[in-house]
Amino acid sequence: MFTKVLIANRGEIALRVIRACRELGVATVAVYSEADRESLHVRFADDDVCIGPAPARLSYLRIPALIAAAEITGADAIHPGYGFLAENAEFAETCAASAVTFIGPTADQIRKMGDKVSARTLAAEAGIPVVPGSKGAVEDPAEARRVAEGIGFPVLIKAAAGGGGKGMRVALDAESFSRAFQLARNEALAAFGNAEVYIEKYLARPRHVEIQIMGDQHGRVMHLGERDCSVQRRHQKLIEESPSPAVDQALRDRMGDDAVRLADRIGYVGAGTVEFLLDEDGSYYFMEMNTRIQVEHPVTEMVTNFDLVKEQIRVAAGEPLQFEIKGGRVRGHAIECRVNAEDPYRNFQPSPGTITTYHPPGGPGVRVDTHIYAGYTVPPYYDSLLAKVIVHGNTREEALARMHQALDSFIIEGVTTTIPFLRRVIEHPDFVAGQVDTKFLERNPDLFKAE
Ligand code: MV4
């Protein structure tokens, strides 16, 4: 096992990783920007290093500063958390070259999945359903148009270097295709320095269902069931749950087997997520693979009783996966709401500032992952996640009732939060019925209007 882990992150996930290290008896190093001096991750870690000014590119994204911090403090491993450098192959490579273990997959595995065309090809080769579309990247506009006509409109043009919704364009018909194709390539080049795009049939109302997987260095890969993340706004997930109201055991087995097969094919090590689109008719298609621990990992932890972060550290240290979930079955139901410092009635405008009052919810089956406290100032430089409220119940109904209670009794004053909005969403009849898809919030603009 490692002796000391440096956490190359901030906020709630830095605290989450520190907890896992504590349980494993591993010492921790926090790194922080000048804006995060008063943060709890700095206080809770055994050691801490200031790595630069507030903007992330000058601190949390500075690879040489992070490697130097690890060397100075004697850390033998780095946990990247999510965001920042978590899916940066160059960072994983630099760690390896510096004799510091990157807690995550290899640089090669990150690259293979980071390129969405290569990921799609790997999935298709593994016999996993992919959305009907182009064989690989398409460059020539005339050929692209022929491909799109072959698929049938509407189609979606996606950037090979994109992911998470960045660099996508819908083309509704052949007439608008050429323009959309050109725009998509230009946007991809501007955003990612790579103009490569591919084309898929556009699914109108899919659900977002993702499978959590975990691989070790001994050739074993397992899955831990699915999360339904259909409640999103502009590609930001707001609510996640497990199991998905739309997935039965037979479908879980099929999606789980597919996810494991894909990971197996590249000898995947660490925690990963295979994202699928689940269509209205029950067919599902591979979308992309995330090679990191995700924000919503706690819902899986609640229904499997499996500590994903601890396991990430254990497998990075070479230990075999220990855990077995019987027949891939999960226990009860978990829901997560992301609480942000944003004003939902002003287009989710960030609302940084000082928290004056703080009282978290509690009781049976309630978990709050957060870094905030009364007197904490939410800086304007980073994402506005304040807390994740995760509830577990024996049934979805019980979990929902607990989420109601939890949101009602969560007191955060001093900054505007999304709590009242989340309350409204979980009361919506379609959400209560589990009838949501990725267009759910768009269809319900009233949810964004102040009373
Ligand atoms: C799609 C799609 C419909 N059809 N692909 C959005 C994020 C990126 N990973 C891919 N995304 C989508 N791909 C096809 N062929 C719809 C989306 C999509 C979406 C997917 C999951 C969750 C929310 C979404 C919101 C809008 C669009």
Image (spheres, rainbow, N blue to C red):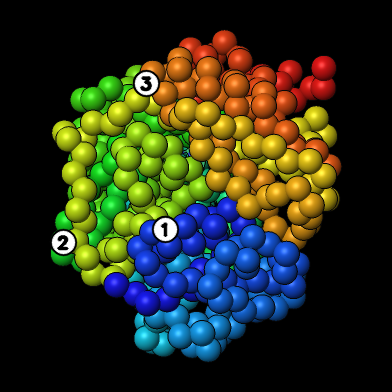
Residue at x 67%, y 27% (from the top left corner): 409
Residue underneath mark 3 = 394
- Establish if 68 lies above or below 92: below
Label 1 SS: helix
Left/right of residue 169 with respect to residue 145 in the rendered view: right
SS category of the residue bearing label 2: loop
In the rendered structure, the answer to whether residue 375 lies left or right of residue 86 reads right
Q: Are marks 1 and 2 in contact (CB under 8 Å)?
A: no
Q: Is mark 2 within 8 Å of ligand 1?
A: no
Cα distance, mark 1 to mark 2? 24 Å
What type is the residue that disc 2 sits on?
Answer: Gly
Q: Nearer the viewer, residue 249 or 128?
A: 249
- Residue ID for mark 1: 20
Marks 3/2: CA distance?
34 Å
- Up the image or down, 273 lies above or below 265; here it is above
Mark 1 or mark 2: which comes first in sequence?
1
Q: Is residue 112 above or below residue 256?
A: below
**Mark closer to the observer (1, 2):** 1
Which residue is label 2 attached to?
219
The residue at 35%/63% (across/down) is 24
Would you place residue 96 above or below residue 60 in this image?
below
Q: What is the distance, in whole Å, between disc 1 and disc 3 at their CAs?
A: 26 Å
User: The C terminus is located in which quarter?
Assistant: top right
What amino acid is labelled 1 in the image? Ala
Residue at point 22% right, 65% down? Answer: 319
**Under 8 Å from ligand 1: the CB of mark 3?**
no
